[in-house]
Image (cartoon, rainbow, N blue to C red):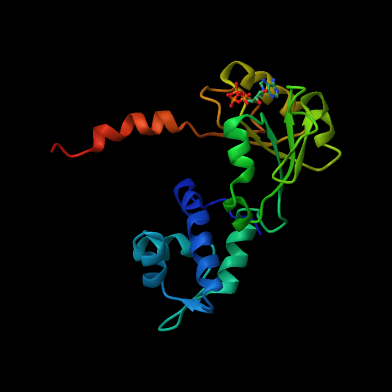
């Protein structure tokens, strides 16, 4: 079953719902109302009901949503059900912090490889992952790793992306503060915390 008609905005919220559902499951809940989930994740309950209506009816009036079923369905839509393997390139300060970030596991990600060009870092173990020489990026295809995180400096980001694409990577989370160009078949999401901070003062009420 394909879910072509799910809007991007809904897809953006699905991981947030997933986290809420996983946490409520940890607390022993088997069902959850849209209102409870709304309180949990900070999204309006009508928005939640609308988002879920795109992929089926999981709610029972008066009982709420079945946590297990809904969790499975969201994981399936996001293609998270197979514990996707991820590679990280650039094990500097930011890269090391990302490697140690525990929340990736909540969504089922397995950070399976890390690469760098610095000989002092290659061979070192960081968060249980041995840093490999970046010249070995081409091994990713054979290892069935098609997701990657880029944490190299700006001037190395494009060449890193090119090497990743050549190695079969189809999804890139880019932390380098720059725009990178990739073929259409590859999806890039750039996270630039400085740019996010830069738009925050605009929204601040005058004191
Ligand atoms: P450090 O000073 O420990 O290197 P840093 O976070 O200040 O940390 P950056 O200059 O931001 O370092 O670089 C991040 C990491 O990216 C470094 O570990 C660097 O060796 C690595 N790096 C730089 N160019 C490449 C590249 N082309 N491929 C892979 N890794 C790279």
Q: Residue at x 81, y 23 (%)?
A: 135
Does residue 173 appear in the picture of this structure?
A: no
Left or right side of 40 for 115: right
Q: Quadrant of residue 41?
A: bottom left
Q: Position of residue 101 (x, y in %)?
A: 59, 47
Depth check, front residue: 186 or 19: 19
Q: Residue at x 47, y 31 (%)?
A: 192
Left or right side of 37 for 162: right
Task: Check the image and name the residue furthest to the top.
Answer: 155
Left or right side of 196 for 178: right
Does residue 97 appear in the picture of this structure?
A: yes
Depth check, front residue: 24 or 66: 24
Q: Residue at x 37, y 60 (%)?
A: 47
The N terminus, quarter of image: bottom right
Q: Residue at x 72, y 35 (%)?
A: 169
Task: Check the image and name the residue furthest to the left.
Answer: 207
Q: Position of residue 149 (x, y in %)?
A: 64, 36
Q: Position of residue 99 (x, y in %)?
A: 64, 42
């Amino acid at each position: 079953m394909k879910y072509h008609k799910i809007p991007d905005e809904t897809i953006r919220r699905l991981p947030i719902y997933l986290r809420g559902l996983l946490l409520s499951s940890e607390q022993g809940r088997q069902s959850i109302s849209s209102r409870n989930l709304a309180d949990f994740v900070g999204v309006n309950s009508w928005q939640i009901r609308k988002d879920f209506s795109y992929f089926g009816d999981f709610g029972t009036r008066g009982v709420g949503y079945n946590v297990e079923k809904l969790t499975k369905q969201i994981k399936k839509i996001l293609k998270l059900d197979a514990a996707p393997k991820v590679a990280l390139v650039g094990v500097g300060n930011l890269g090391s912090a990302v490697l140690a970030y525990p929340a990736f596991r909540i969504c089922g990600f397995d950070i399976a490889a890390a690469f760098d060009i610095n000989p002092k870092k290659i061979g070192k173990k960081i968060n249980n992952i041995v840093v490999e020489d970046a010249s070995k990026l081409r091994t990713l295809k054979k290892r069935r790793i098609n997701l990657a995180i880029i944490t190299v400096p700006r001037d190395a980001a494009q060449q890193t992306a090119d090497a990743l694409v050549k190695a079969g990577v189809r999804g890139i989370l880019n932390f380098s503060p720059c725009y990178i160009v990739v073929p259409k078949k590859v999806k890039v999401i750039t996270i630039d915390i400085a740019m996010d901070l830069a738009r925050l003062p605009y929204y601040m009420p005058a004191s």
